[in-house]
Amino acid sequence: MNAMMDELIHKAIGESIADLAAATGDEMYVVEAVIRAGGRKIELTVDTDKGVSIGQCAKLSRAIRARLEVCQDNIMLAEGDFDLMVSSPGIGEPVKVQRQYLRHLGRLIRVNYLDGEAQPKEITGRLLEAAVGAGEEEAPSITIEAVKEGRKKRSAGEAPVTLRLADVVKAVVQTGL
């Protein structure tokens, strides 16, 4: 039962995102979808390459709700007996989807990663490049220019570092310029 409900919910999310993209030209994507309490609580985090607005989240929420409430395959959904929350990734939240790196080019980012000997390392710097697209011959990667800690966040004078995304443990965009 839960697997069938999860499938119905994911289908409604995908169709609603596709419909909004066709209508507005904004290519939205799912960062995270969490379905709890047997489908009674749905938490969806979405983004676009330019960032997502509150208005876009509200439109998507209405579209998903309308699609689920006409679902005759599940009485709970059809009666609207569920909570749906659609939001954008918050400031200080870890990057969860490779595509998010593209949106944060030029921003400060703190990355915890494993070096060539699988030792944990950390770098804070400006995100210069993100090679995350499909069809590339090389492994997805990001390039970061380290910055000096402090108020001015100037270049540390070191060569930029390229990290394979497979080695990234956690990446968090930092507040500031």
Image (spheres, helix red, strand yellow):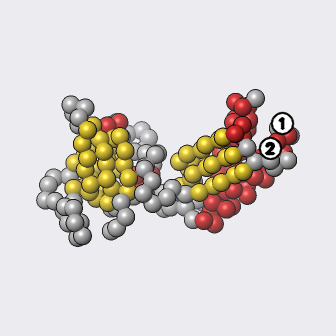
- The kind of secondary structure element at disc 2 is helix
The x, y position of residue 64, in whole percent, is 72, 51
Q: Quadrant of the N terminus?
A: top right
Q: Say if mark 2 contacts mark 1, CB within 8 Å.
A: yes
Task: State whether residue 125 is above or below residue 81.
Answer: below
| Residue at image point 73% right, 58% down | 62
- Disc 2: which residue: 77
Visible residue check, residue 69:
no
Q: Position of residue 22 (x, y in %)?
A: 65, 56
Residue positioned 69% across, 36% down in the render: 6
* 157 displayed left or right of 115: left
- The residue drawn where x is 36% and y is 48% is 171
Q: Is residue 161 visible?
A: yes
Residue density around tag 1, few if under 14, some if 14–19, many if 20 or more, within 10 Å: few
Outermost residue to the left: 157
Q: Amino acid at mark 2?
A: Leu
Q: Which residue is mark 1?
A: 73
